[in-house]
Amino acid sequence: MPSSVKSAPSSASNGHAPRITGKATPSKLQANKMVFYFGKSKTEGNATQKVLLGGKGANLADMCSIGLPVPPGFTITTETCAAYYRAGQRLPVGLMNEVHKYVNLLEKETGKKFGSAENPLLVSVRSGAAVSMPGMMDTILNLGLTDAAVEGLASKTGNRRFAFDSYRRLINMFGDVVMGVPHDMFENAFKAIKAKYKAEDDTDVPEEGIIELCEAYKEVFRKRVGEMFPQNPFKQLELAIEAVFKSWNGERAVAYRRLQGITGLTGTAVNIQAMVFGNMGDTSGTGVAFTRSNTTGENKFTGEFLINAQGEDVVAGIRTPRPTDEIAKWDKKVYDQLQKIKVKLEKHYKDMQDIEFTIEDGELYMLQTRTGKRTGQAAVKIACDMVKEKLITEKQAVVRIPAGDLYQLLLPSFDQSKKKTAEKIAEGIPASPGAAVGKLAFTAAEAVDRAHKGEKVILVRTFTSPEDVEGMHSAAGILTSTGGRTSHAAVVAAGWGKCCVVGANELLIDEKAGTMTVGKRVLTRSDVISLDGTTGEVMIGTVATTEPKLSSDFQTVMRWADKYRTLAVRTNADTPADARRARDFGAAGIGLCRTEHMFFDSQRITAMREMILAETVESRVKALDKLLPFQRDDFVGIFTAMKGLPVTIRLIDPPLHEFLPHDDKGQHEVAKALGVTVDKVRLRVQQLHEANPMMGHRGCRLCVTYPEILKMQVRAIVEAYLDCVANGIKAMPEIMHPLVGTQKELNFLRELTLQTIEEVKKEKGWQKRIEIPIGTMIEVPRAAVTADQIAHHADFFSFGTNDLTQLTFGYSRDDVNNFLPDYLHRELLETDPFVSLDTSGVGELVKMGVSKGRSVNDKLKVGICGEHGGDPKSVHFCHTAGLDYVSCSPYRVPIARLAAAQAAILAENAGK
Ligand code: PEP
Ligand code: MG
């Protein structure tokens, strides 16, 4: 989630979302101007003033300026809303005088009069902040109607039913939205009238019924509010303006801002606009549409409309709207006009628009335009089409596509229409996107076994550990009831692009009983669930999915991205299959190959355990010798898949206890397999127990204690390298030491590594040079702070920002979810620092590490391989911090490529 305002790419002519900050910057002349007019007589605002006028207000002014048919009106600024709060929730002095003045202008332009009993001016009142914000005040329509004015409207339009229908809508909306009268009180009154007149639909109620309804509504209002419905239109307007201001800090709006990470805005604007009526009969109507499809991007006007209706009828879903295509059959003139407006709007805003319009007796009016939200697929197609249409440049297209949304193009997803009817049972953290369907499997072994037999299973666990990887790999999806975004399940699944939901804490998973309980519902291994890794939803049964097809537009966008980016993109991969996939996605090498994942295969784990249980160096070496051929073959496979590209291999990292079973049954099995007593296994597990294993005997500390592990791994790398060379395959290994904190530590490991390389060379009779850069991860704060010392012994640095974040904050990666939601809820943290790099804390350490490292070694190659390497915002940071590459899971490679190009283009634009 971005820390500042999240909005769809906007209309700015440079083609990318302008960063909206909280500082309104009216010119000096306009500094105290509270109200801005838009209409035929004059238009005071423009599209650049979104912060001051809100998105809606700025675009209404803008549409007037380009000659579109917009009902005239005026906008009260967001600054005025801020002043309202500064004054202890009082309307600023002089505001209502200004409003009076502007209503006069509106009266002149429309030839109507506010509150008039002959020809009344009615207005709509709408909130509108700089970013569209559901949760703020709903629209009030028909404001200005009173007992007198309703008669004026009736005689002017010659439609008494329409006039009173408008009046009852106002009393209802005003009562509900401004005065807090519960909506169902009005509903009940309407039901009673419908019953009395035996009317099925609202529209079946005759004129006298609607007039009666107005009286009933006024009575509801009086009873609940304790006052009569205001008969002074200016009083109505004043109360409505204040209600809009109040809604800025309403619970829903505050929650929305928090969830979307919207910060820094000072308030909402209020838009007051002359009413036009879509409910004046069968030549009137109202609609909402996208100028191009928001789901596929097809260049086709797409939306819905209703004949004889007001805007809220479309949204409320009481009547089923018709597709906008059918407007042509209903009113060809209006349809043609809308097509022209579509072209004009897109030419002007250079982006797809989301519009609202009303037709009053055959006359079309535009009520709103804004940049339309869209799916990843639509974003890519629209950007490519608009380049072809010469509406935008390649660079604008690249900057406009939300990089993270590319994910949607790479994975199968649930059919949205099918999802609507699915039964949702829980929601967790969406850890790895995609759509998975399968029967429940409660252990890794069970998942492997059943998957082998051709069953699709979802592995459900309280949490996962390295022991579970095979089962995780075999499963169609992974679901855990605990853990956060960097928990084992989340990181491993994201690495594979496997659908995964973690931390779904409503679920009670009982491995022994083979049940998953949620509320009163008990699911067993014969039950099927559907897992949405994009949203975190868990649904019962099979929800249909749709397969992705990588369009040529996608390839075009990637080509553009590569043209403009300077940051290289590598991948985190531990298998040849992952490596190939990442290469297909455009990875320029492997930035992190976690070797320990290779030890969990059933054949290797026994040798690994033998090594851990060994009591002497000799017996440890004997066990390691068994692992050597496996490691070598793995590396040959990976080097082959990545031939010609660098592969950074990280030596063993996790604490050894992770490789031993902790349960009795597992320990018995190990004892049997290795021919030792169970007590011996138990004792070793106890010995390896640490109070805080993530800060314990792990990372390079293991090779300090057991140098023979390093020797085996380095030997496997060199032997694999020589095998590849013999087969004409260009292998380019790099050796990386994890969790280094001091220069002596790295120096020791480097020497041992070099020594081993030489030993193998000699043994194999290899005369030529072997070019294997040796580097270190920077994931301990001390390493960043002393990077100028450490860099003496490193050819490259790779920032392991998972651990660096853990150790900088002191937040356990595995347990952060216990308290992180509270921190986000209270806005003590803007985002999850394990998802998006904490630029001001961890980021400073990264910058320090880069500059100190390069101060002693200007050839030092610097990258990042924590999960942040695939997060667009963090990629931007990495570009600015001067890194050479980012490394991320295969499925995030295209995202990182695009984000890197965006960072480069934005930096170039900023420098201009
Ligand atoms: C890291 O700490 O950022 C890293 C990449 O290593 P791991 O996640 O394997 O600890
Ligand atoms: Mg790490």
Image (spheres, helix red, strand yellow):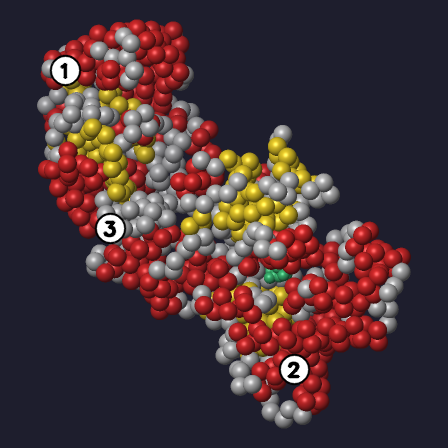
Corner quadrant of residue 388? bottom left
Mark 3 or 1: in front is 3
What type is the residue that disc 1 sits on?
Answer: Asn
**Badge 2 is on which residue?**
719
Q: Earlier in the sequence, mark 3 or mark 2?
A: 3
Q: What percent of the width, then of the height, locates residue 642?
A: 52, 74
**Badge 1 is on which residue?**
159
What type is the residue that disc 3 sits on?
Answer: Asn
**Badge 3 is on which residue?**
299
Q: What percent of the width, then of the height, locates residue 700?
A: 70, 68
Left or right: residue 739 versus residue 679 is left
- The residue lying at 72 percent from left, 67 percent from top is 604
Q: Are dots 3 and 2 in contact, CB under 8 Å?
A: no
On screen, residue 687 above or below 788: above
Quadrant showing the C terminus: bottom left
Q: Nearer the viewer, residue 812 or 321?
A: 321
On screen, residue 98 above or below 758: above
What type is the residue that disc 2 sits on?
Answer: Glu
What is the crowding at mark 1: few (fewer than 14 residues within 10 Å), some, or many (at least 20)? some
- The residue lying at 26 percent from left, 23 percent from top is 141
Between the residue at mark 1 and the residue at mark 2, the CA separation in whole angstroms equals 91 Å
Label 2 element class: helix
